[in-house]
Amino acid sequence: MNHLSLVWDVLFVESAITDSKSAGIVLPAMGEHTDHPVRLVMNWNTVREGQKTSGAGYTSGLRFVMDITDSSTREVNELNELLCGFSHELVASNTISIAESLPLPLDRRTRKSFPLVGRLMLSVRFTHGLGYDDAKSIKNAIGTQTKETKDGLDPLRLGKGSSGKRFSEEFRSLMSDSYWFRFFPTGGRELSEINVVTGAADGGVYELAYDLRVAIEGLVKQSEGAWWNQLDPDELTLTPTLIVDMKEPIGSSFDPSTFHHLDETGAEKLVQNVIDIEMKQTGDEAVLEDLRYKLGRLTRGRRIPRQLTSEHGLVQGLERGLIGQEVIRPWLIDEFVNCLGFFLMTRKPKYWRNGTVEILLVQPYSDELVESLKEV
């Protein structure tokens, strides 16, 4: 079972967003409402219309992240009911979600259950100047890491300091609606000790929506005649067989061969940069070996031929749907997550701590979802 968290979001009423005192009032009220340990506190960040996106912005809400990996289904359901009952005069909305930490690369179970439409959290922890050996450089790194992350962590943003150009327009079109958070680990501290407005954060998160359906449909359609051919409708057989051979890329920007992590020349340089920086930061051979291994797996770019038969439900005239579900879907999911994972691990290793980046699948809370995740 992957690491699971319950995500509790409260958003402020409009009049409370621009009042810097609001977070300090609502935060302890949330803490008093539950005795379940809080792993992370995050602040929703909003900027005024016309303000630069990289500006500090306002705290428009709070997010508690609570570990429920070892909690029973009953305990999680009871916690959800309790949190849903929270109300405050400064709070406009109160929602609960479940976040599942994704393994990098994905395992078979996670890939199979991964929804084609959903939301992801891209999370990085700051280095706080690790790797620098003089006070001025350390201070400068600590002073700029939040801005560097707000600019560089969003894969959709274009412009100076941003990261959107690392991805094709088609890849970016698979994602939308990104929200920025800073996070503050509790580490046994009382919530009253955490200042989510002016305090120093330990990392940053973008949560964004994704939708892979158009990419899958496009790949199935464009691959016909290149990777596979329709069955002969006049050849009636009880044991039809269809080979899907994806060995050669096709002229589609949704083909993973165009993705950021499979640019062999560029990826090799980025990986070496990560290794060089890790040498300066810790020089830990075990960490270095783990980085090489994981980045090597993310950039493998497997294109294995698949054989479909009647056991998969193969029927003449219905090939497209089966190819989309059994071949293109799991392959695209793998490379989509691999691409984002590679991006997090290589984009800003001077500011983002190696080995602590996370991609979390965020889904609306339901008793059925909790039960299915706990059954694994």
Image (spheres, helix red, strand yellow):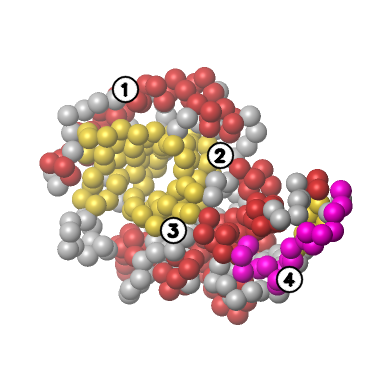
Amino acid at the residue labelled 1 = Gly
Q: Which mark is residue 100?
A: none
Q: Residues within 10 Å of mark 4 (few under 14, many from 20)?
A: few
Q: Residues within 10 Å of mark 2 (few under 14, many from 20)?
A: some
Q: Residues within 10 Å of mark 3 (few under 14, many from 20)?
A: some
Magenta range is: 220-238
Q: Position of residue 287 (x, y in %)?
A: 61, 58
Dot 4 falls on a residue whose secondary structure is loop
Closer to viewer: mark 4 or mark 1: 4
Q: Position of residue 203 (x, y in %)?
A: 39, 52
Closer to viewer: mark 4 or mark 2: 4
Dot 2 falls on a residue whose secondary structure is loop
Dot 3 falls on a residue whose secondary structure is strand
Q: Which mark is residue 3?
A: 2
Lower position in the chain sequence, tag 4 or tag 2: 2
Lower position in the chain sequence, tag 3 or tag 2: 2
Amino acid at the residue labelled 4 = Lys
Lower position in the chain sequence, tag 1 or tag 2: 2
| Residue 335 falls in image quadrant | bottom right
Q: Is residue 371 visible?
A: yes
Residue labelled with disc 1: 85
Separation of marks 4 and 2 at Cα, in angstroms: 35 Å
Placement of the N terminus among the 4 image quadrants: top right
Query: Could you tell me which residue is drawn at 41 percent across and 69 percent down?
Result: 164
Residue labelled with disc 4: 247
Lower position in the chain sequence, tag 4 or tag 1: 1
